[in-house]
Image (cartoon, rainbow, N blue to C red):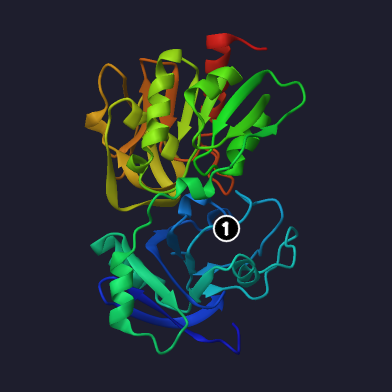
Amino acid sequence: MLTDYKKAYLILADGTVFEGKSFGAEGSVIGEIVFTTAMVGYQETLTDPSYCGQIVTQTFPLIGNYGINDEDYESGGSVVSGYIVREWCEEPSNFRFRHTTVNDFLKQYGIIGLYDIDTRRLTRIIRESGVMNGMITNIPDFDKERCLADIRAYSVGSVVPKVSVKTPEEYKTDGAKYKVALIDYGYKHNIRRELLKRGCDVTVFPYNVTADEIRAFKPDGIMLSNGPGDPADNTASIATLRELIPDKIPTFGICLGHQLLALANGASTVKMKYGHRGGNQPVTDLELDRTFITSQNHGYAVVADSIPESAGKLSHVNANDKTCEGVRYTNAPAFTVQFHPEACGGPHDTAYLFDEFIELMQKEGGER
C-alpha cells in the first residue's frame, strides 16, 4: 500500500463514520452508496454508465490485481461518483496490463476513492438498512453535522442525459444483414459489440430520439440499453416507446430499457432495498425451465403483477427473491430482460438472447 497515504472518511446518512485511507482524486463527494459482489470485472464496473451518481463499494477484498487495459472499457470513461475497496493492488500483473493501476485510473477521471475500511461491515449496513446516501472526504476537519445535512439532501436525480450520446453514432460491420437502432440511455459498449459480431450495423441514438426519427431510420430492430437512475424519471423516453409499440418493430431491451418498455406498456416499477449488483445472480427462464447465472446492476425492478395481460407476460424471475427479470410482449415483437446478457466480465450464460433478437428480426422482416 501507499506509504504516504492520507486519511479519508466515509460518512453515511445514518451518522455512521468509517475511517480509512485515500486514493484516487482528492476532495469530497456525495453519492448513493451501493455494493457489487462481482469478483472480477472492476474495470467494467468503473466504466459502466449505470453507476452514474453512485459511490460503488466492491465486496471482493482485493481490487486491481490485473490493472487496467485498453480493451475492457464499457464507455468512454467513468462516471461513478466515488469508489470504495478493502484493498487495492499497487503492482498489478497481467499480459494485458497497460501500466495503469486502479489508483491512476481514479485520478485520471477525478474519482475520489477510499480503501482500508471494513467493506464487509459497510455491506451489512446497506443490506440491513437499504441503499443510503453517503460522503467520501479526505478533509480531516470536516463538520459532521453540516456534511450530514448535505448527504441527506442529496438525490441522484435525472442522470440519463449526462451519460447518453448527444448525436447519432454509426458502427458498421462487413456483410451486415440487419440495421439496428440502439437507443442510448447509458449503454455498455459490449451491447454494440454483440450486435456487430452477429451481422448488425448499429446506429446509436441519443436517449431523446423521437419516434418519427426512429421511423425515418427504418431499422430492422430496436435495442433499448441499460442506464442509470429511476426509470420513472424518463417520461419523454417512455412516451416515445409507447408511440412506437404499434409500429411492431422487433425490440430487445436490457436493464433500464427493460424497465422503460414496461412503463410504456402500463406496468409500474419499484425501488429495491439494495438492488442486484454483481456477477452471480441466478435467473430462471420460465419458458426453458432453466436457471442461469447472470450479471446485474440495478436498483429498481418492474412489478411483475403490474404487467397488463393484454401487453405481455413474465418470462424470467430472480431465483433468490422472485422479482421480475424479463418480459415477453404479446402486443408487439419485443422482449426485455433486467440482467446483462452482454456481460463482458462474465458470466456469458444468457448471450443466447442476442441470437433470439436476430431470429426475431429475421422472422419479422427478413435479411437485407
Question: Depth check: 123 or 176 in front?
Answer: 176
In the displayed structure, 336 sits above or below 54; it is above
Image quarter where the N terminus lies is bottom right
Q: Is residue 364 visible?
A: yes
Secondary structure at badge 1 equals loop
Question: Depth check: 198 or 173 in front?
Answer: 173
Q: Residue at x 67, y 12 (%)?
A: 368
Other residues around mark 1 within 10 Å, as few (<14) / some (14–19) / many (≥20): many
In the displayed structure, 16 sits above or below 364; it is below
Residue 305, percent across and down? 22, 30
Relative horizontal placement of residue 17, taking residue 280 as reference (left or right): left
Residue 224, percent across and down? 49, 32
Q: Amino acid at mark 1?
A: Ser
**Residue at the right extreme, as displayed:** 174
Question: Depth check: 320 or 44 in front?
Answer: 44
Quadrant for residue 319, please give it: top left
Residue 360, percent across and down? 52, 17
Per the image, the residue denoted by label 1 is 78
Q: Residue at x 40, y 21 (%)?
A: 243
